[in-house]
Amino acid sequence: MAQLQISRNDTGGAVTLRLEGALDALAAASLRTTMDQLAGRQIVLDFTRVDEFQDLAVPILSGGLGQSPLRLIGLGQHHARLFRYFGIGLNAPAAMPFGRAEPALA
């Protein structure tokens, strides 16, 4: 399995974390630590280049995310739904990087 690469881009008070590779439980825990260090800042998580996304990563990332404004982009419909189950909504249209385009989720 390919490791998760995280590229950070700071712009105008927001921090975009572009994810590339595989997102499993271990990678999600590491990403969660990075996000905790950014508490209070607007965080944009870009999943567009994640090619393997284990469902178990969602609850690990979701815990305590109310501390920072959050925007999720590049999610497929399945993972967007999982985030909603954990109380995390989307602020941007969802993209389906793993196949055909799906309708945007609100």
Image: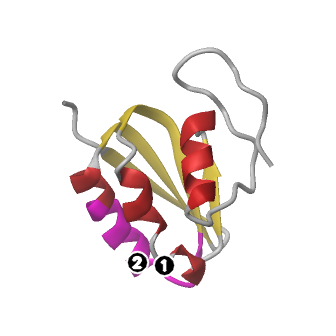
Q: Are marks 1 and 2 in contact (CB under 8 Å)?
A: yes
Density class for disc 2 (Cα within 10 Å; few <14, some 14-19, many ≥20) is some
For disc 2, the marked residue is: 36
Q: In terms of secondary structure, what is the magenta stretch mainly?
A: helix
* Quadrant in the picture for residue 84: bottom right
Q: Position of residue 80 (x, y in %)?
A: 61, 45
Q: Residue lying at the far top in this picture: please name it.
A: 100
Q: Is residue 11 left or right of residue 22?
A: right
- What's the amino acid at mark 1? Gly
Density class for disc 1 (Cα within 10 Å; few <14, some 14-19, many ≥20) is few
Q: Position of residue 54 (x, y in %)?
A: 35, 40
Vertical relation: 40 (above or below) 24: below
Q: Is residue 68 left or right of residue 103?
A: left
Q: Is residue 18 left or right of residue 84?
A: left
Q: Which residues are magenta?
A: 29-42
Residue for point 64% across, 15% down: 100
- What's the amino acid at mark 2? Asp
Residue for point 48% across, 78% down: 64
**Camera-side residue of 12 and 3:** 3
Q: Is residue 79 left or right of residue 59?
A: right
Secondary structure, mark 1, is loop
Whether residue 31 is in magenta: the answer is yes
Earlier-in-chain disc, 1 versus 2: 2
Whether residue 62 is in magenta: the answer is no
**Camera-side residue of 38 and 23:** 23
Disc ID at residue 64: 1
Q: Position of residue 78 (x, y in %)?
A: 57, 37
Vertical relation: 104 (above or below) 65: above
